Amino acid sequence: MSMQISLIVRGQHPPGDIAAHLRDDLELVRRADQVGFDGIVKGSHYSAHPFQSVQQIPFLAYAAAIAPRLRLILGLVLLPLHKPLDLAEQLATLDIMSNGKLVFGCGIGYRDVEFKAFGVPRAGLGKRFEEGLEAVKRLWTEEFVTMKGSHFELDGANCTIKPVQQPMPPIWIGANADVAIRRAARLADCWYINPHNTLTTIERQMDLYKRALDEYGKAFPKEVPMRREVFVAPTRAEAIRRAQPYLEEKYKAYRAWGQDKVMPAGDDFDHGFDELSSPRTSCHRCGERCNPV
């Protein structure tokens, strides 16, 4: 089994010179390509106070031009916020621009400020997500699509461009909760494992995922993507000294946004740094939980 390593460019910057921050982020893409990373990942949030961040689709389009060897991984598209025809054409364009290197990572989202701004009710989010994903798949694989969803209607609609990857780019569903992991087993090429749940929770949920695959008659996927927080330094103490202020600020924001409210019980962020990091890390050499940063 081979391992591929990708770099997520979060771009979560403090307010300031966003043009300079963008130049730094694009330099990370170039360096990732030069030193041998396999892919570049960009997430998406809206109204992401207290951070500034450029949006994922134009960023990844630029990345395709300056680092054409790298896979472009959407991590994640907040699918319920978008209309499927627009999304299908935008992402097909990215796949064409990258010569078939796009990965369609998608999830439901959890932030009220985003749902309200896009006019998306919290009730029925799972249905809205599944309808949107089905529509994108059909638009990529059928010439004309007629389909009525809860928030859109396709009446002989045509995605005028198709992805390079046939029948479509890989679909990774990001999931924290058990019900969403079952959805990933049913609808996606794989479960996109998040960086926030504890290793104990992920171990339990992997068993759940495997049982769901068996139930749906699907083989275990060839790719098992997993995100983790990583900081490289000569020593653990140096890594903590340098990384801790930024990780604390990020997880403070995530808690304020309500992210840990949609995670399994006990995996919340209401802890100090040591307690927060300990159950989410393991040694790359021996697998023991010896808390590298």
Image: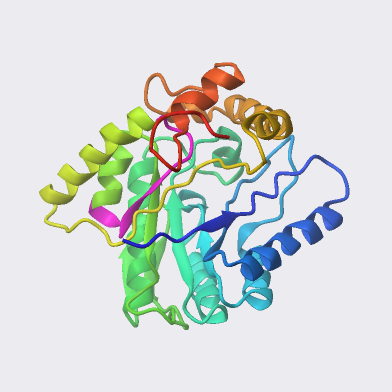
Is 140 included in the stretch rendered in magenta? no
Instruction: Name the residue located 76 percent from the left edge and 44 percent from the top edge.
Output: 13
Q: Is residue 97 above or below residue 82?
A: below
Q: Is residue 49 above or below residue 266?
A: below
Q: Is residue 266 above or below residue 212?
A: above
Q: Nearer the viewer, residue 18 or 240?
A: 240
Tell me where residue 56 sits by quadrant: bottom right
Q: Is residue 291 above or below residue 47?
A: above
**Image quadrant in which the C terminus is located:** top right
Q: Position of residue 261 (x, y in %)?
A: 47, 25
Q: Residue furthest right?
A: 17
Tell me where residue 72 sits by quadrant: bottom right
Instruction: Name the residue located 49 percent from the left edge and 24 percent from the top edge.
Output: 278
Q: Is residue 290 left or right of residue 183?
A: right
Magenta range: 186-198
Q: Nearer the viewer, residue 127 or 272?
A: 272
**Image quadrant in which the N terminus is located:** bottom left
Colouring used for the render: rainbow
Q: Nearer the viewer, residue 127 or 23?
A: 23
Q: Position of residue 47 (x, y in %)?
A: 68, 41
Q: Position of residue 148 (x, y in %)?
A: 33, 61
The number of discs equals 0
Q: Is residue 11 left or right of residue 275?
A: right
Instruction: Name the residue located 64 percent from the left edge and 54 percent from the top edge.
Output: 9
Tell me where residue 221 sits by quadrant: bottom left
Q: Position of residue 128 (x, y in %)?
A: 38, 48
